[in-house]
Image (cartoon, helix red, strand yellow):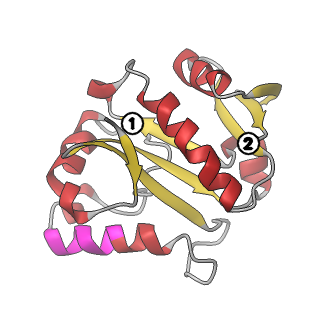
Amino acid sequence: MPRLIAPDVRYHSSWLEGYAEFDGAHRDGAGAEDWPLEELEDDQSFRRFVDALVNDARPESPRKPGYVPCTYLWIVDGDTFLGSLAIRHELNDFLLNQGGHIGYSVRPSARRRGHAAAALANALPIARELCIARILLTCDEDNAGSRATIEKNGGVYEDSRNGKRRYWIVPA
């Protein structure tokens, strides 16, 4: 049964396999933008990466300008890494217009099985615990799968900006 967990070094090999499936495509919610794959293949570098993801939830953690505190979670099933989900604790101008509070990606071999919808459903109570009263989610205009995932979880369409559909969810 897939579940959300904090990033964990035990998933190193499976994470690398999932990373490879994206073949260089953007992985929303992964938090790996500044980590070259060659570096993440090393056990100690991967441990630092996992620590950085976990620590990013703390407001006092150092981060690049324009980045906000973020809780990173992994979607796993048993020993298999299926994808990533990020809950951004607040919105800046970019996130308000294009990125939203929650971003997620599921590795290509695990898509079309409801993993993203289930992960988003499980992330909503966590966002509520972070005092996010209204949750903004966005997806590309042409991403029918993400659109269905958001709508299945109660997303109400507000508008489109710069090629992104914007939805709001009010967690119960």
Please tell me which residue is depicted at 80% across the width and 52% down the height of the picture: 133
**Residue where numbered disc 1 is placed:** 25
Q: Secondary structure at mark 1?
A: loop
Quadrant where the image shows the C terminus: top right
Residue 111 seen in the current view: yes
Examine the image and state in which quarter residue 2 appears: top left
User: Mark 2: which amino acid?
Assistant: Pro
Measuring from the top left, give residue 17's x and y in whole percent: 18, 42
**Residue 67 higher or lower than 118, as above or below:** below
Left or right of residue 117: residue 97: right
User: In this orientation, which residue lies closer to the viewer: 170 or 41?
Assistant: 170
The answer for how far apart the CA atoms under marks 1 and 2 are is: 30 Å
- Residues drawn in magenta: 43-50
Q: Residue at x 33, y 34 (%)?
A: 107
What residue is shown with label 2? 171
x%, y% of residue 153? 64, 28
Rendered image quadrant of residue 27: top left
* Residue at x 48% of width, y 38% of height: 119
Q: What is the three-letter code of the residue carrying label 1?
A: Ala
Would residue 51 be counted in the magenta stretch? Answer: no
Q: Residue at 41% of width from left, 30% of height from top?
A: 115
Q: Earlier in the sequence, mark 1 or mark 2?
A: 1
Determine the main secondary structure of the stretch shown in magenta: helix
Residue at the right extreme, as displayed? 158
- Between disc 1 and disc 2, the foreground one is 2
x, y percent for residue 163: 70, 27
Q: Are marks 1 and 2 in contact (CB under 8 Å)?
A: no
Which quadrant is the N terminus positioned in? Answer: top left
